[in-house]
Image (cartoon, helix red, strand yellow):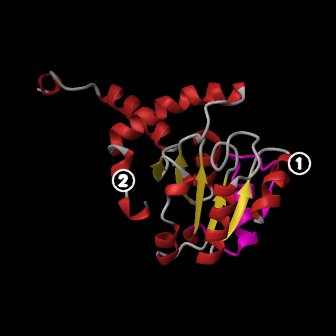
Amino acid sequence: MIGEDLIGQEPVSQGLRDGGRMALLERFYPDEYLDSAYEINYEKLYQDGYRGVIFDIDNTLVPHGAPADTRSMALFTRLKEIGFESMLLSNNKEPRVKMFNDKVLSRYIYKAGKPSPKNYIKAMELMGTTPATTMFVGDQLFTDVWGAKKAGIRTWLVKPIHPKEEIQIILKRRLEWIVLFFYKRDRGRYVKLDRRYR
């Protein structure tokens, strides 16, 4: 009997609802999740065919609003020596972005409108790369990662460098925690994801 077959089973409608929720969450999942932009194995990524790196700035490379420091300047020098093109993609206004870029000597797009994919695509055009040869590194799921995924770019989510953030970002972090809870449950601990790039 059909009724008997369903006894003890999850209702189909409930399964579909749960599947829909998971699909909604999974669209925000990063491809990789690490502690820091500074621990990524860029040399290995270049060997694997990547040619361009797009970075968020605040709380990805330096604390929010901070100028470029010795570590970030050394990273961009290293990327140039490897052969990478690079681009800074920020929703901030130009004075803040230019202040950082003046020290690292990359290129930048300010007031980028993330998570719209428009300026991710523009960044690739400026670097002469494609989604298949471009990587994105940022600290926020709903702007950085989501925008890059819509542009077809492989994403690296990193932990925020400093806890001090603007209130609107703090509110989004609470929602990020929910997504990351399911991400870690589904994918396992992030340190096990792909050791080739660490």
Quarter of the image with the C terminus is bottom left
Does 126 appear above or below 177? below
Which of the 4 quarters of the picture holds residue 38? bottom right
Q: Are marks 1 and 2 in contact (CB under 8 Å)?
A: no
Residue at image position (53%, 49%) is: 36
Residue under pointer 1: 95
Tell which of 82 and 120 is nearer to you.
Answer: 82
In the image: residue 108, left or right of residue 160: right
Task: Pick whichever of labels 1 and 2 is earlier in the sequence.
Answer: 1
Residue under pointer 2: 193
* Few, some or many residues within 10 Å of mark 2 (<14, 14–19, 20+): some
Q: Name the kind of residue labelled 2 in the image.
A: Leu
Q: Does the magenta portion include 75? A: no
Q: Which residues are magenta?
A: 107-131
In the image: residue 136, left or right of residue 194: right
Tell which of 54 and 43 is nearer to you.
Answer: 43
Q: Name the kind of residue labelled 1 in the image.
A: Pro
